Amino acid sequence: MKQKEAQRFGKWLIPVSGGIIITVSGVGLYIDAQGFIENLLSEVVGIFAGIIVALLVVDRYIKHQNERQWAKVRNLTYTAIINHLCDMAVEAIIHFLVKDHRLITPIIGGRDQPNPSTIAAMAELVSLLRQVQDVDSEGRSTSDIAVEFYEGVEWDLDQIQDVLTPRVVQSPAEQQVIDALIEFDHARHRLHNAIIAHKRIATHGVLPHVIELIERAQGLYSVIYKTWK
């Protein structure tokens, strides 16, 4: 019973309220049209000004809160990224530079905190990969080795792409880090497509994409080093 009464009351509330507003407005206009309009306009301006101020305050507060939250996980997130980058570089050394492991130590040394020695080691790794022969001593092509390399680092790549990149993009992170992550992601997709093509029709075109991926990894690592706090 009470629910029906409430529904009836709600049904008539809007029309009655509208009628009252129209009546009051009409009386105000009749008594003092100019004064009524001026008061109405000032009220409207005041309401809009209040809304704008409130939005600015809320926006600043939300931005400040986001920055505080990001500050707590910033270095943790960046450390996770460089961990995966270093592990991926080590896998490239193991797969392609079988007899030359001297770069492993400086690369592993930069897993927990970015340092210039790791950047230099990654740059040298890129240079050495450009000198790799098309076929190794066992008769395997560089594309076949690249497939093995990709399978070995796929989890690292997935973690960067699916977990860490979205976290950085949605945070108030430095734009250069976001740009470097996007470039790295594009390189990963080009490598993935080259591997698919090689599996369907044997090619010798996968290694250049591995080199590009390591280059982008080195670039991303360098940017994180420059922005490290």
Image (tube, rainbow, N blue to C red):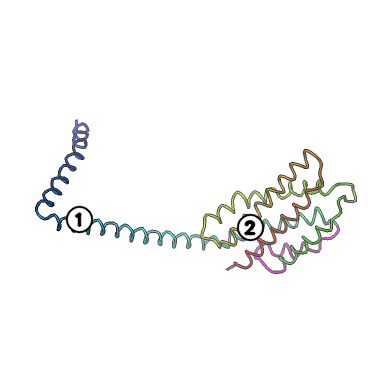
Quarter of the image for residue 131 reads: bottom right
Residue drawn at x 81%, y 41% as measured from the top left: 202
Image location (x, y in percent) of residue 39 = 18, 58
Predominant SS of the magenta segment: loop
Residue drawn at x 64%, y 66% as measured from the top left: 225
Q: Element type at marker 2?
A: helix
**Label 1 sits on residue:** 40
Quarter of the image for residue 73 reads: bottom right
| Labels 1 & 2 near each other (Cβ < 8 A) | no
Q: Element type at marker 1?
A: helix
Image location (x, y in percent) of residue 139 = 89, 47
Question: Image check: 76 left or right of 149?
Answer: left
Image location (x, y in percent) of residue 154 = 70, 48
Residue drawn at x 42%, y 59% as measured from the top left: 62
Q: CA distance from mark 1 to mark 2?
A: 58 Å
Disc on the earlier residue, 1 or 2: 1
Three-letter amino acid code of the residue under disc 1: Leu
On whether residue 12 falls in the magenta region, the answer is: no
Quarter of the image for residue 220 reads: bottom right
Q: Quadrant of the C terminus?
A: bottom right
**Label 2 sits on residue:** 81
Q: Quadrant of the N terminus?
A: top left
Q: Magenta residues?
A: 99-117
